[in-house]
Image: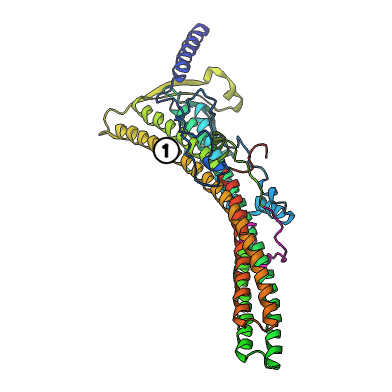
Amino acid sequence: MTTIFGRRARLLGTALGALTLLSACAVGPDYERPSAAVPPAYKEAADKEGGVTPVAFAPPVPRDDGWRPAAPGQAEAGPWWTVFNDPVLDGLMRRVEVDNQSLKAAEAAYRQAKALSDQARSGFFPVLSVNGGADRAGRVGSGDRTTSGTGSGVSRGGTPVTTYDAGLGASWAPDLWGRIRRSVESNDANLQASAADLAAARLSAQAQLATAYIQFRVADERKALLERAIAAYRQSLEIARNRHAVGTATLADVFTAETQVRSTESQLVALGVQRAQFEHAMAVLVGQAPAAFALAPAPLTAAVPAIPPGVPSALLERRPDIAAAERQMAQANAQIGIAESAWYPDVVLSGSLTNSATILPRLLQAPTAIWAVGAQVAQTLFDGGTRTAEVELRRAVFDQSVAQYRQTVLTAFQEVEDQLAAQRILARQAAVQDDAVRLAREAERLTLNQYRAGTLPYSSVLTAQTAALSDEESALSVRQSRLLAAVSLLQALGGTPPNF
């Protein structure tokens, strides 16, 4: 008996070894990340006063050129908003990390992907089961009764018998063709893509908050600007009234001056709508109802930072959307192998060990046990082309993911170039606009003095004051545009650039 069992054990071990070797194979293509054209430098990063000099694109980067996969989490975004040196903004960013509901949803999606990855990996292991039970039975006769279960029975016509049974079962589907391995690859890639999506959602929420905060503070600055203008216009109105009282100005001058005051006051009131909307947007981003959130007015202290863009190749590792697109390619590639594995038979090995006894201790005695081992093989012979179509579908999905990856890379370069150009051009515009503000203020001062002296009509004062206010508002708008362009550039770069 021992010889028979030993021979069977050796045979089973040999079979399992062969299956293990077969399971080391995996059908379908191994993943190789496609190349993408990467420029050697950003053309808009140069300080150009006139036209731009085109920069030729480099050829596709070969795989052995140090171009590593843009794995999620490989390059952390970092606290990039600290470049604005605003403690209030820093505090709001911490609340985004904790309470933003979009981030919570993205984090839950990541945990779902993690569970799917763990679930796929479980396919490598056998399934074990155990069962047991007890039955009590007796002959049915006059006044007899039978009971089942673990409780005791009473029979008047015969002796009830209790039967105990127990069993162990196991089944295993060896991964002969790599279907499970490809499934694990697919789910692992999906997990990494989900991690990149979470990073992208975090970066997006942070950028949205920084944008809303800057717009909110600019609204405060515009409010202060209008209040100063109204105060100056009231002084002009008082001058017009005084001159009218002594007969050196017309009533039309008074009405014109008062109209100017009221018109500017109307702009000040209307500004409250924008300010409220920006405040409400920040409330939602930090996970609060607008009614429970408020920020006190404060001046805009943030300076426009100088942001080094780095080299374009670094962008491939920093942008979470590029990382997600690259991992989606890997997932699509693994799906091809899963589809091709359908051409091969499914093999399931199973075994069981059962025993039964009328006395519970005898369940553990081997001579009464029954064992069984078996194998099932299933193969589809004809499916009308379903498997062929599935393979073609998965290849097309992979090709689509490659195109989407390359498009994501190109779009990322475009976004960086756009914001670099905006930074450079807006800086020149700011310098010109500051000169315009200085000249407009001087013109306003001289015109008002000449009006007091009676050498100019009030219409000249109105024109000068309107121009001065318009230029100051334009300067504030340019400053806002420069700050928002800085936010967009940092977002386009995937966060704080290295060595910043």
Q: Residues within 10 Å of mark 1 (few under 14, many from 20)?
A: many
Vertically, is 242 above or below 211? below
Horizontal arrangement in the rendering, residue 222 relative to residue 329 (left or right):
right
Where does residue 134 sit, x and y in percent of width and height?
55, 34
Which of the 4 image quarters holds residue 452?
bottom right
The residue depicted at 69 percent of the width and 48 percent of the height is 83
Where does residue 419 sit, x and y in percent of width and height?
55, 48
Horizontal arrangement in the rendering, residue 264 relative to residue 409 (left or right):
right
Where does residue 406 sit, x and y in percent of width and height?
44, 37
The residue depicted at 72 percent of the width and 57 percent of the height is 301
All told, the count of numbered labels is 1
What is the chief secondary structure element of the magenta stretch?
loop
Vertically, is 334 above or below 418? above
Return the residue at label 1.
401
Confirm whether residue 108 shows in the render. no
Label 1 element class = helix
Amino acid identity at mark 1? Ser
Instruction: Name the foreground residue: 184 vs 138.
Output: 184
- Which portion, as a residue range, is magenta? 281-303
Which of the 4 image quarters holds residue 496?
top right
Q: Quadrant of the C terminus?
A: top right
Instruction: Name the foreground residue: 44 vs 407.
Output: 44
Instruction: Name the foreground residue: 496 vs 348.
Output: 496
The residue depicted at 63 percent of the width and 83 percent of the height is 257
Extreme residue toward the front, this view: 455
Confirm whether residue 40 shows in the render. yes
Residue 293 in the magenta stretch? The answer is yes
Extreme residue toward the top, this view: 3
